[in-house]
Amino acid sequence: MDNMERPESFQELGIQAELVEALAKEGIVQPTEIQKSTIPLILNNRDVAGQSETGSGKTLAYLLPVLQKIDRNKRENQVLVLTPTHELALQVQRQIQDLSRHLAATITSAAIIGNVNIARQIEKLKEKPHIIVGSAGRILELIQKRKISAQSLKTIVLDEADQLLDERNIQTVKAVLKTAYKDSQILLFSATLSQDAIEQAAGFLKDPAVQRITMKATVVPTIIHQHFMCEQRDKLELLRKLVRHLEPGRALIFINKTEEIEKTVERLSYHGLDAVAISGASQKENRRQAMADFRAGKTQLLVASDLAARGLDIKNITHIFNLDIPEEPQLYLHRVGRTGRAGQSGVAVSLVTQRELPLLHKIENSLKISIPLRRLSFGKVISEKEEKGQQTRTRTKAGAGTKTETKAKAKPEAKTKTEAKAKTKTGVKAKTKPHKAKAQLYK
């Protein structure tokens, strides 16, 4: 299709008026590139593999056509959305609810995730929700218990497919897919969709349309980047000082390893920082409360890894703190892209050890940005130039002090000569006195 003919509105993409109005009520009026590329294909029942950056509208890219195709007159499970994290499952369900409340006939949904009372979930499933969103392990368990009717599923979505198809999850996901009707539509969406992931799902995909939206690796110009050098053991103490000084409204703290999230929160709390975490280790209610508090502004800091934060859309982030430097520039781009949105300013702060410095330079070179060195001096963030200026002023003051001291020492000699002359005039012999004064002066 020629670019001039490419659909530029939700109506032109084939989305029904009722859903377009629902979108407008949620403040969404213009489709994104991934939505333009995939919505018509999904409406035409094609299997689709879609790749696009975090925050580019992937969730609505599959939800809008899926919602449109649901037969609201039937009380049966029609759509299954698998997610790698509990938080993402809850976020997807929240988006479904936000849209469906504006519709004449409600579309029902349920979030089914692990570490939750399964009896309550079974009760919820008795209502036969149109859409089920959740984790593969618990979904498979409930399919095997015949509480979810896999045969009635028209569409199965793998959200953040690269994670769902990795070696930790692939067997469970494949087991879920095998239970579904062979003509079910399969949709894969992810921020990074490798060819290997597509091949892993190849046995379940029917002539998939692969759509990759590769945006320029550019960083939003409203973000201020800076880094602070320190030893690994001093990072949390430096972070505490920076939080106290910068006073972020709402900040994300990134570490590299998901398994260290809870430990990091404990250490931050020990250092007097009010932080919460998103990770699979804590109970569902604790995580839900943590996210609710953070979104509401009750908690200032949220600790996450790149894996745990994937797919999460949190508004009004003012600061990003990289407690660990990411291994790849693209990960840095994903992290800092969560601030400085919609023309607002944002601050990205990286705490860097000497060992991590090559990674920082790699990020600068790859993304064509500067991440200048900053230091904390008497509670104030200063640049290298300002620090050199301070050092120059200090040396100048020290030099001025030495001159003053020299002058002060020279005064007694002048005074002594005056006194000697005065005494000479009065007839007192004082030839040796000035010499004694000089001797005392130069001892």
Image (tube, helix red, strand yellow):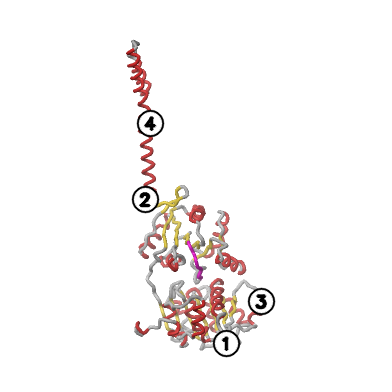
Disc 2 marks which residue? 385
Disc 1 marks which residue? 72
Query: From what the image shows, is residue 1 above or below residue 427?
Result: below
* Direction from residue 303 to residue 32 in the image, left or right: left
Quadrant where the image shows the C terminus: top left
Q: Is residue 388 visible?
A: yes
Which is nearer the eye, 47 or 31? 31
Q: Secondary structure at mark 2?
A: helix
Query: From what the image shows, is residue 317 above or below residue 411?
Result: below
Q: CA distance from mark 1 to mark 3?
A: 24 Å
Q: Position of residue 148 (x, y in %)?
A: 61, 83
Magenta residues span: 312-318
Of pointers 4 and 3, the one earlier in the residue sequence: 3
Of pointers 4 and 2, the one earlier in the residue sequence: 2
Q: Secondary structure at mark 1?
A: loop
* Direction from residue 361 to residue 66 in the image, left or right: right
* Residue in the picture at 57% in, 56% down: 269
Of pointers 3 and 2, the one earlier in the residue sequence: 3
Query: From what the image shows, is residue 181 above or below residue 235?
Result: below
Disc 4 marks which residue? 405
Q: Secondary structure at mark 3?
A: helix
Residue 185: give its label: none
Q: Position of residue 72 (x, y in %)?
A: 57, 87
The quadrant where residue 340 appears: bottom left
Name the amino acid type tagged 1: Arg
Disc 3 marks which residue? 120
* Residue in the picture at 36% in, 37% down: 399
Q: CA distance from mark 4 to mark 3?
A: 83 Å
Q: CA distance from mark 4 to mark 1?
A: 92 Å
Q: Position of residue 319 (x, y in %)?
A: 47, 61
Q: Residues within 10 Å of mark 1 (few under 14, many from 20)?
A: some
